[in-house]
Amino acid sequence: MPPRLKSVTTAVQQTLPEAKPAVVAAPKAPKAAKAPAAPKPTAAPKAPKAVAVAPVAAAPVETPAAPAKKTVATERTVRPLGNGVDRIAIVGGLRTPFSRSWSDLNDVDPVELSTQVARELLFRLEIKPQDVDQVIWGTVISVVRSPNVAREVAMNLGMYNCSGFSVSRACASGFQAIASGAQQIWSGECDVVLAGGVDVTSHAPVTYKKKVVDQLQKLQKAKGMDLLKEVSQLNPVDFFPTPPSISERYTGKTMGEHAEEMAQNFAISRRSQEELAIASHKKAAAAVQSGKLAGEIITVQTPTGPVSTDNLIRTDMDAGKLAKLKPVFDKRNGTITAATSSALTDGAGCVLLMRESRAKELGYTPLGFVRSWAFAGQDPRENMLLGNVYSTPLALDRAGLWLGDIDLLEIHEAFAAQVLSNIKMFNDKAFFRDKLNREKVLGEVDFAKLNTRGGSLAFGHPFAATGIRIATTMLNALKQDDKQFGLGTICAAGGMGTAMVFERN
């Protein structure tokens, strides 16, 4: 295995030899263009015809070598992210308890939940609101009355000079908020960014048929007999609301149905899925009982009282009982049950990002740093939840690392079948060659490094907040376990995936 890159700077230096020829060639191009323009004899046009044909014909002959170069390039010559000067420090991170939807956090709306966790983080870090340059927040479920949650949070905290903007990239929205914050810092636009994510499925908007909406619009303008006429055209049945749907618009299938297809395509057994679910809950419960998660979960104030603990983790999962559960998405031949699927969840979280030099100026010791990330897409009609294997190789390339260099790995557990399918493809040479145009696979996953504090099957999955949870827990775990590199990866709706590499020092 090639030697591990010592830093992002090392990775940049490795790409420079290839960059220099392009830089040198650019200035020469204008001189070559002027030479044919100066002479005007008729002989000049004939020469290009004879000369131009040969190079143009020869170029396609040489191009077959390009794919081989591309494969080699993706191994280690991808230019790392960043400006080569400052790293992106995560100074701190917090989250709310994650609660099953329509339970403990049912009465707290997304903006209020986000505000509480953001206020607590700024309070604990003792940072002045005026030192925060931007607020970025991820959301998946639309907040109808407050579509720009980031700005609402900024105003609630009295940070009126922070414009604030919200992002949405399905389940990868939390990582997108972090990536967007890092980009703003590297561009020189900001020094300090508050990045977070929230989803409260309990507050998902309920819609009505378009016919009802149109009719109600007409009622607002109608008067007298016209009003009675419009009312008479309303059918009481039409007033039944359209329930929220989690199906994919492009494929027409739910995420669970796609996961079920993957379980069948990759021969993922029901027993292996249940073993992964049991392990996730056991590790999450152990992390809670040992106090390893205590520093990252706040107490949320609700109308019915304070909430301070996750309520989805089970300490007594019985394999025998799991085996008796009925399949959810394929009643006849399916293997996925409620126990091997992440639950609909309410929750929020945030991290404070800083330019490394700014963190030093303000006297902060960072939890760690964002070393790299990658977002990827695939055809969602074929094994839609393989975004982990599509995004992870590129994130590792940009970090200058191999999978073996990673000390702690978290693969988001949307479904146990999805996790096991991706792990299988991590080491599949045919898949890497045919789908990713790569000769080198990621390799086998060391399960001792996988989801060491539990995963989304145990904690739940409040879509846009999951990336924040992974980042915060990962950096705390690296410190607690005295490790250096961590990688988190999330599959997302629409055939997307994301991976992010963290480093402690």
Image (cartoon, rainbow, N blue to C red):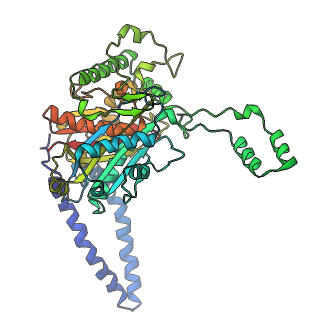
Count of labels in the image = 0
x and y percentages locating residue 160 in the rendered image: 39, 58
- For residue 136, say whether it is visible: yes
> Which residue is painted at 28% across and 24% down in the image?
284
Q: Does residue 171 sit above or below 74 in this rendering?
A: above
x and y percentages locating residue 121 in the rendered image: 28, 43
> Which residue is painted at 31% across and 30% down in the image?
423
Displayed quadrant of residue 306: top left
Q: Nearer the viewer, residue 302 or 258?
A: 302
Residue placed farthest to the top in the image? 320
x and y percentages locating residue 27 in the rendered image: 26, 77
Compared across the picture, whether 387 is left or right of 223 comes to left
Which quadrant of the figure contains the C terminus? top left
Compared across the picture, whether 57 is left or right of 188 comes to right
- For residue 443, say whether it is visible: no
Which quadrant of the figure contains the N terminus? top left
> Which residue is painted at 81% across and 44% down in the image?
230
Displayed quadrant of residue 279: top left
x and y percentages locating residue 393 in the rendered image: 28, 42
Residue placed farthest to the right in the image? 225
Compared across the picture, whether 98 is left or right of 472 comes to right
Q: Nearer the viewer, residue 481 or 297?
A: 297
Displayed quadrant of residue 367: top left
